[in-house]
Amino acid sequence: MNSADPQPDYWTQYGAFQQVKHDLIRHYLNGWFPKLGTWAGRVLYVDTHAGRGRHRSGEIGSPLVALKTLLDHSYRDKLLQKSEVRFLFIERDDENLVRLKAELNAIGDLPSGIRVDTRGGDSYAVLSKIIDMLEASGHAMAPAFIFVDPYGFKVPWRLLARLMAAGRVELFVNVIWRELGMAVQQRPAPGHGLAKTLDDIFAGSDWRRIGGDDALERMHDAAELISDLVGAKWDTRIRMTTGGSAIRYILLHLTNHDQGRDLMKECAWKVAPDGSFEVLQRDNPKQPLLVTPSPDLTSLRTWVIEHLQPEPRSRENLRNALRSELWLPTHLSQVIRKLLETREIEEDGAGNLSPAAQRSLW
């Protein structure tokens, strides 16, 4: 096992980026545990780069965030009556692993039904071995939430695609976009060392399709390529920026389930209440918002009217169509209510909505 942490300074500071990652994990697992724990029989949380468990400033790391989310959950005892919850924390650095185990031991005895496993070594090798065993046995992986927070941009998307195909698996990946985007922009010639690295990451040369005139467009191209590569039906993107158009990281949630998409959208709005799905590095994670920004629903109003033009639609139909957008069902309800009040749309006896008929003045 490699005993050298490539980013030892990471543990000396705790800023907005770390806070948002942890908040998203906490918010998501608060909804994910009860959704699956009531029927699955077993659920799994995996942290591929678990770290040492706590920052020097005292804030806990992602493994403890995940474990404490379950321990403190109001439905914990009911969930554990029906399902076992397993946590797998993988860390390649010897010293970090020792410190992580000490943090876990300090929690004390865990309730029956919660199992925690820590493993040393390369996380991708560990996961590859697990997938090999599942594929050889013909068994599916238990419903899993896998948090991938790598040290660099070399994420093996081919392996993550195998994980997605192994069962009801959801991925939450911190894409180190600044370095990855710079590598893609260099457009290395086929056969060049960097080109081989990108070919290996993306399981082929499709990364050359990532284009666009600005960083945001290139980021969306890359996210769509990754989503296609792993076979995800839905991807939700939260940008971590250093100001202006400089995107540092992309927090990318990948799922094949509508409920997973809906839940992550709700979580994203909690960390970016203005609807930008963007977090700035300079934001102070310890400074609460004195005034929660109100989203501008103008574009959603236009969206609703446009979707009602071809034919009448029910609210449920509109909600399903809205899933691919960033807006929430609560925003949709607000807009529909306002449009009905202003008589720009109307509702028939069957509950279908349509643009209001133009009435003659004669």
Image (tube, rainbow, N blue to C red):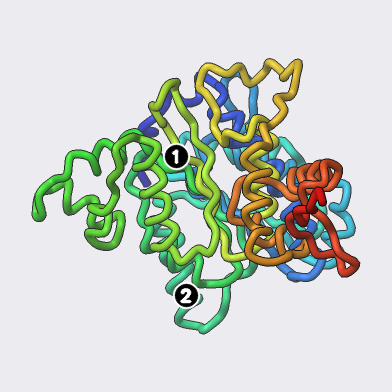
Q: Compared with residue 317, is residue 264 higher up or lower down, i.e. above or below?
A: above
Could you give the CA–CA distance between mark 1 and mark 2, rounded to whole angstroms? 26 Å
In depth, the one of 269 and 356 nearer the eye is 356
Image location of residue 8, percent across then percent down: 42, 26
Residue contact at pointers 1 and 2, CB within 8 angstroms: no
In depth, the one of 45 and 258 nearer the eye is 258
In depth, the one of 237 and 85 nearer the eye is 237
Query: Could you say whether the residue bearing mark 1 is in a helix, strand or loop?
Result: helix
Taking the spot 44% from the left edge, 68% from the top edge, the residue there is 162
Left-right relation of 332 to 137: right
In depth, the one of 321 and 31 nearer the eye is 321
Callout 2: few (<14), some (14-19), or many (20+) C-alpha neighbours within 10 Å? Answer: few
Q: Compared with residue 189, is residue 279 higher up or lower down, i.e. above or below?
A: above
Query: Could you say whether the residue bearing mark 2 is in a helix, strand or loop?
Result: helix
The amino acid beneath tag 1 is Asp
Left-right relation of 305 to 156: right
- Residue 166 can be seen, yes or no: yes
Where residue 158 sits, quadrant-wise, is: bottom left
Which numbered disc covers residue 133? 2
Taking the spot 54% from the left edge, 32% from the top edge, the residue there is 278
Image location of residue 294, percent across then percent down: 72, 28
Image location of residue 48, percent across then percent down: 49, 49
Q: Compared with residue 331, is residue 136 higher up or lower down, i.e. above or below?
A: below
- Residue 71 can be seen, yes or no: no
Taking the spot 75% from the left edge, 70% from the top edge, the residue there is 41
Left-right relation of 251 to 285: left
The amino acid beneath tag 2 is Met
Callout 1: few (<14), some (14-19), or many (20+) C-alpha neighbours within 10 Å? Answer: some
Question: Farthest residue toward the front?
Answer: 362
List the residue tagged with mark 1: 94
Which numbered disc covers residue 268? none
